[in-house]
Image (cartoon, helix red, strand yellow):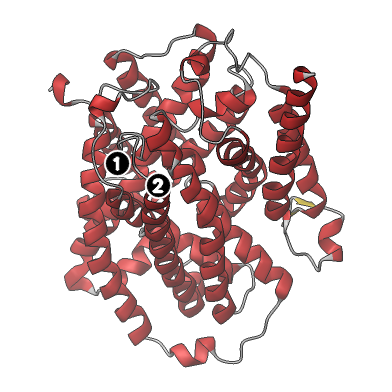
Amino acid sequence: MAAALERRSIDPVPESERHGHPRSLFTLWFAANMQITSAVTGALTVLVGVHPLWALVAVLCGNVLGGVPMALHAAQGPKLGIPQMIQSRAQFGVYGAVLPLVLVVVMYLGYFASGNVLGGQAVAQITGLPVDVAICGYAAASALIAIVGYRLIHRFGWVASALSVVVFVYLTVRLVGGHDLGAVLGAPTLDFPKFLLALSLTASWQLTFGPYVADTSRYLPSGTSVRATFWWTYGGTVLGATWAMSFGALAYAFAGKAFKGHEVAYVVGLGGEALLIPLLFAIALGKFTVNVLNIYGGSMTVATALTAFSRRAVLSQRARVGYIAVVGVLGGVIAVLGRGEFLGNFVLFLDFLLYFLTPWSSINLVDFYLVRKESYDLEAMYDPGGRYGRWAAPALIAYFAGIAAQIPFSNVEGVFVGPMAPVLGGADVSWLIGLAVPGALYAVLQRTLTFSRSR
């Protein structure tokens, strides 16, 4: 059994162990998006006050735009063969990278907890177990798949992808066929600020996948082209998310409060009593792919943060399993304690992540594609005394500047409204600022410092 478990964690994957084709990234990311949490995110676009027709446009545009940086991260995996967040040490320094790492751990735990809530609800209805017990069982099962590792995750993604197509085709037909679509989509009025808010919600879904993506592509042969990795990932994530979010937006437009807070029950109710158990099983299994990715990536991110100070480049199999277990327990506890006001909390969670992770993504991509142009010293990423150092001022300055630049344009309803948001009619365009400012500033600072040192 031990031989069947994945051995690699935060260490580079040698060429002799590389395998696979980037087409597996399509099914993996399609399955990761074709699930109930994506539908909940789509429902938010109508919940914030956007007309259903414009909500569908926001879903499409948000995923098309947000999917670009997400898929660009995917190409880093085959080139470097290391987890996504280890690579951040080249920009932030070995110790400095701990700052975004902590935020990414929060992201992983949040998404893992939300997945446990929704998946646990489905399991509870199937088995009759108390919801809290079902949530814990769902978290434990996710941890077991993550422990087995990369190969099983990709194979499971193929199965879940095929199942998702069958299930969502059926559910979409039932949803649309059982309601007056023309009446819901008719007489569209555009509230542009709310449209931009809906756009930011859907874009944030894709942008927050950035810390995951290289983790799922790092075993591909190093000769895998950037173009192939990008398009297979982009196609899967955009198609899957757009479909599932559109379904959620229409479900909320049709059902309103009958959907809010009762997402799983409403969806399975579309199939009638005869298909109750099969649909519950499909929802639980469909949610499983991204839940496994959350605990898989989360455990490596925790390990990356802690090993920055111990200088360890390789984890034993026992240590790897231990990190997965820790993330699994924490995610299960958070799910049980926080499952009450799930939908409202999820909106705030997405907003929070967007402000802090978008600058990291911008800096990481600019460094990989424009500054260092895919050339890195892997050994130095594990050595605080190496070429990347303990703390890297250009990235840290650009990161905090990127966060600060977003504040005037921020609009988190009921929490904070920046001074520029009312000028724009309440629209939240902070994520666009968060993509543009830190990457540009980082490139300037890197070139300035390099020029100064070369004089």
Q: Residue at x 73, y 51 (%)?
A: 433
Residue annotated with mark 1? 138
Q: Is residue 132 visible?
A: no
- How many marks overall? 2
Disc ID at residue 235: none
Can you say whether 377 is above or below 231 in the image? above
Residue 292 position, x and y percent, is 33, 40
Residue 172 is left or right of residue 363, and the answer is left
Q: Is residue 100 visible?
A: yes
State if disc 1 and disc 2 touch (CB < 8 Å): yes
> Between 441 and 227, which is closer to the camera in this rendering?
227
> Between 234 and 163, which is closer to the camera in this rendering?
234
Residue 366 position, x and y percent, is 62, 40
Q: Residue at x 71, y 37 (%)?
A: 443
Quick one: quadrant of the N terminus? Answer: top left
Q: Residues within 10 Å of mark 1 (few under 14, many from 20)?
A: many
In the rendered image, which quarter is residue 2 located in? top left
Q: Secondary structure at mark 1?
A: helix
Residue annotated with mark 2? 115
Amino acid beneath label 2: Gly
Residue 370 position, x and y percent, is 61, 40
Among all residues in the image, which is located at the extreme front? 455
Q: Secondary structure at mark 2?
A: helix
Residue 122 position, x and y percent, is 30, 54
Amino acid beneath label 1: Tyr
Can you say whether 252 is above or below 131 in the image? below
Q: Residue at x 52, y 75 (%)?
A: 56
Can you say whether 187 is above or below 144 in the image? below
Q: Residue at x 63, y 59 (%)?
A: 200
Residue 112 is left or right of residue 98, and the answer is left
> Between 282 and 26, which is closer to the camera in this rendering?
26
Residue 413 is left or right of residue 75, and the answer is right
